[in-house]
Image (tube, grey):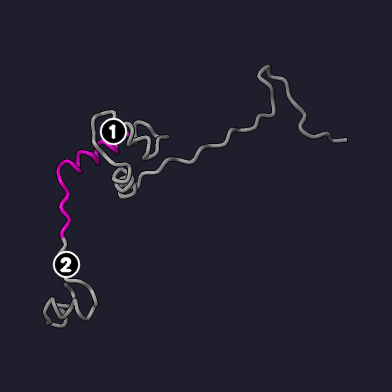
Amino acid sequence: MYIQQKLGVSERRACRVLQQPRSVQRYQSNKSEEEEVLREDIIRLATKYGRYGYRRITALLRAEGWVVNHKHVERIWREEGLRVPAKQPKRGRLYLNDGSCIKTTSLF
């Protein structure tokens, strides 16, 4: 802990001054091997199906045999920075399929 080293005080005292539980200081996340495989599968499906969001990806994962919650998939989705691209608007055409032109505004 930075304050502990800087001021030369105990962990207890530093946490009391910061009004922070000591358990927060000692917490170490443990990511399992299964979590990493799930993360890779989510990325694989997201790249394969570019227009699918995390809910649809959750359904695909369940179809593959994963027992996974949509909230878990959403958390991984956000951590990996995945996004569904915005839909592109349909472009307006000024012509018909037969090649003839359409006048959009009259000049007179």
For the image, the number of numbered tags is 2
Label 2 close to label 1 by CB (< 8 Å):
no
In the depicted structure, whether residue 21 falls above or below residue 92? below
Q: Earlier in the sequence, mark 2 or mark 1?
A: 2
Can you give x and y, in whole percent of width and height, for residue 42 in the image? 29, 38
| Residue indicated by mark 2 | 23
On residue 32, the disc is none
Q: CA distance from mark 2 to mark 1?
A: 34 Å
Majority SS type along the magenta span: helix
The residue under the point 32% across, 46% down is 71
Residue furthest to the top: 98
Determine the image quadrant of residue 94: top right
What are the residue bounds of the magenta stretch?
Answer: 28-45
Mark 1: amino acid = Leu
Mark 2: amino acid = Ser
Instruction: Give left or right: position of 35 versus 76.
Output: left
Determine the image quadrant of residue 8: bottom left
On residue 61, the disc is 1
Instruction: Give left or right: position of 34 versus 95.
Output: left
The residue under the point 29% across, 34% down is 44
Q: Residues within 10 Å of mark 1 (few under 14, many from 20)?
A: many
SS at mark 1 in the image? helix
The residue under the point 24% across, 77% down is 19
